[in-house]
Image (cartoon, grey):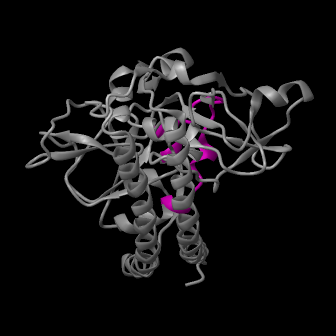
Amino acid sequence: MKNVKRVRWSDVLTIINGKNQKQVLDANGCYPIYGSGGVMGYANDYLCEESTVIIGRKGNINSPIFVQEKFWNVDTAFGLSANRKLLDPKFLYYFCIQFDFERLNTTVTIPSLTKARLLDIKIPLPPLPEQRRIAEILDLADAARRKRRENLALYDDLIRSLFLKTFGDPVNNQKSWPAGTIRDLVVEAKYGTSKKADLSKGEYPVLRMGNITYEGNWDFSSLKYCDLEEKELDKYLVHKGDMLFNRTNSRELVGKTAVYREKKPMAYAGYLIRVRPNKMANIEYISAHLNSTWAKLYLSRKCKSIVGMANINAQELQDIPILKPPVELQNEFAIQVQEINTQKSREQALYDQHDDLFNALLQRAFKGEF
């Protein structure tokens, strides 16, 4: 915004420190518990009762969430409570979407934010009516891309339904498959590189925890780069057909899993585990199992907390229970998954168009070009 003063966050908002709360199973009459990745459960109590922006404190720090209800946030997330006499909450939310919080991160391993650094951020502050006008324009563009995102989610639901139809529910094993562990189905589970990545310098893009979505997809919009020596290529590159497992993150996000399907290899960071199947398994089956509702609950209960973060190491990953249907059936499932993903890629192209438009408007809005 040209000729508009910029003020520090400390002058226009307060930060709500999250803390852990016991979850309840029934959402009726309760309040959502937010972590860095979204709703992770429900509580009988709440920390805040007004429209607020949630941002990750550790792990997933670049995905702000707008909340319009009473809520609780855990210790891996901050709540931003705007002074409504000066700052519109929705305007703050869109500012956060275009802001790169990773530039405030000082850690080499798990991305994290501090309250002091956040409060020092400067935000343009036009009059409240202008803030609301900008937010309304961005709401319209955001609604269009959200609709496309909902369509994409239907394909993820279809894969989950196909998994249950083909293999049955892992809980009751109604098809009586032999039971075992992931260790029985893989030839390796290896950690990635600990090299510090750069925003622009380096031969290989580095996949990090934020590049894997909770649903088991990929987000390549934020990549860093590194160089690898010849002797490191076999250890730290992920190729088409490999699977990556997010071993360290906030409790609600640890265990994010996705199959890498790109032709060009990329490096992968140390808090990810590269998994390759043996002759008894198809990697699409293992990934679908780890993205099932049962596996996500299992991982949430089994992961160890270390200084506010959760962890599942390579040995624990391989100890996860899994059914062992015939590999021929797994291969048939993988073919159907590929067909679904082919259709999904067409919807993804439409989503990308709406996303590009939204981001162009977002950049114009905070450069004062509206």
Front in this rendered view, residue 101 or 205: 205
Q: In terms of image quadrants, where is residue 198?
A: top right
In the depicted structure, whether residue 365 falls above or below residue 161: below
Image spot of residue 196 (x, y percent) = 74, 32
Rendered residue at 53%/65% (across/down): 344
Q: Quadrant of the C terminus?
A: bottom right
> Is residue 354 at all visible to an observer of this figure?
yes
Image spot of residue 91 (x, y percent) = 42, 68
Extreme residue toward the left, this view? 29
In the depicted structure, whether residue 116 falls above or below residue 353: above
Q: In terms of image quadrants, where is residue 105?
A: top right
Extreme residue toward the right, this view? 230
In the depicted structure, whether residue 108 falls above or below residue 285: above
In the depicted structure, whether residue 293 falls above or below residue 123: above
Q: Which residues are magenta?
A: 96-118
Q: In terms of image quadrants, where is residue 157?
A: bottom left
Front in this rendered view, residue 37 or 236: 236
Q: Quadrant of the N terminus?
A: bottom right
Front in this rendered view, residue 237 or 44: 237
> Is residue 313 at all visible to an observer of this figure?
no
Confirm whether the magenta stretch covers residue 98. yes
Q: What number of labels is visible?
A: 0
Image spot of residue 189 (x, y percent) = 62, 23
Image spot of residue 339 (x, y percent) = 55, 60
Rendered residue at 73%/27% (across/down): 193
Report whether 359 appears left or right of 152. right
Confirm whether the magenta stretch covers residue 248. no
